Amino acid sequence: MFLLVENIARFSVLVPVLFAFFVKSEKQTIQVLFYFLIFIIFHQIIYNSLYIRESKYTDIFNSLYTPIELLFTAFYVKPNLKSLGYKKFILISLVFYFICWVPLLFFSNPQDFLSYIRAFTYSLILIYCLLYFYEQMQYPQSLFIYNQRTFWGISGFLLFAAGTFFIFLFDQFSNNVKGFIQQYVYIHAILFTIRNLFFALSIVIKPEKSQFADISLSIT
């Protein structure tokens, strides 16, 4: 059961990728999702190769995953925000993140670094996604938000970040908790699979044309 859940999660990333090949769209959000999924596939391949040959380097390699995931999330959310203030916040927070990330990478224990930086990364992802939903509540662009592609894509990022935030935060204490690794894999695999299914919906759903006039937002 353990391996089955893990393998389903790994192969679930292929579902939205295959859908992307059949959906011809030049929309930036679809392209960002597609490139993010391709990045995940290559990351899994390289990680597995390192784990088999040089397992001591897997933590260092994994430390490169979270900032790239944050960048993809920011590139996906930012074009769908209308508030210049929110867009500036994303840019400023990214700069602050990388200013903190570099020294932590070199001066922290690899396991502690991964735990804290992942928690910090997913807290930012949560904020980015919540900004989108807050803006949609204030200035709705459609009568039914779930008919929009971005709703499913950002919901995927939000669900995964919210569900894995605490397991990444407490990962450093995993050695003291019996059965933590199995629980970690189950939670991560299930949320990873759901996120990929949400991404697939985001790619294939036929977007509803805006039923409301565009509203120019002031800087907040």
Image (tube, rainbow, N blue to C red):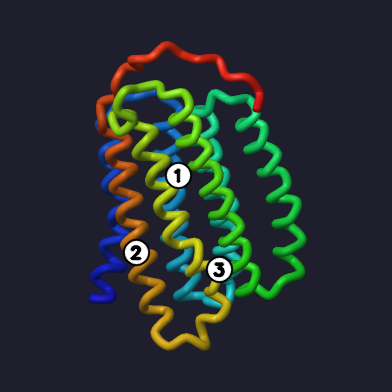
> Number of callouts in the render?
3
Q: Earlier in the sequence, mark 3 or mark 1?
A: 1
Say if mark 1 contacts mark 2, CB within 8 Å.
no
Instruction: Tell me if residue 180 can be seen.
Output: yes
Q: Quadrant of residue 24?
A: top left
Label 1 neighbour load within 10 Å: few <14, some 14-19, many 20+: some
Residue at x 31% of width, y 44% of height: 198
Q: Name the residue that disc number 1 marks.
A: 36
Assign a secondary structure to mark 3: helix
Label 3 neighbour load within 10 Å: few <14, some 14-19, many 20+: some
Say if mark 2 contacts mark 3, CB within 8 Å.
no
**How far is the residue under mark 3 from the one under mark 1?**
23 Å
Q: Name the residue that disc number 3 marks.
A: 169
Quarter of the image for the C terminus: give it: top right
Q: Quadrant of residue 186?
A: bottom left
- Mark 1 vs mark 2, foreground winner is 2
- Is residue 90 rendered to the left or right of residue 152? right
Residue at x 52% of width, y 28% of height: 81
Residue sitting nearer the eye, 83 or 66? 83
Q: Earlier in the sequence, mark 1 or mark 2?
A: 1
Q: Earlier in the sequence, mark 2 or mark 3?
A: 3
Res. 189 mark: 2
Under mark 1, the amino acid is: Phe
Residue at x 52% of width, y 76% of height: 55
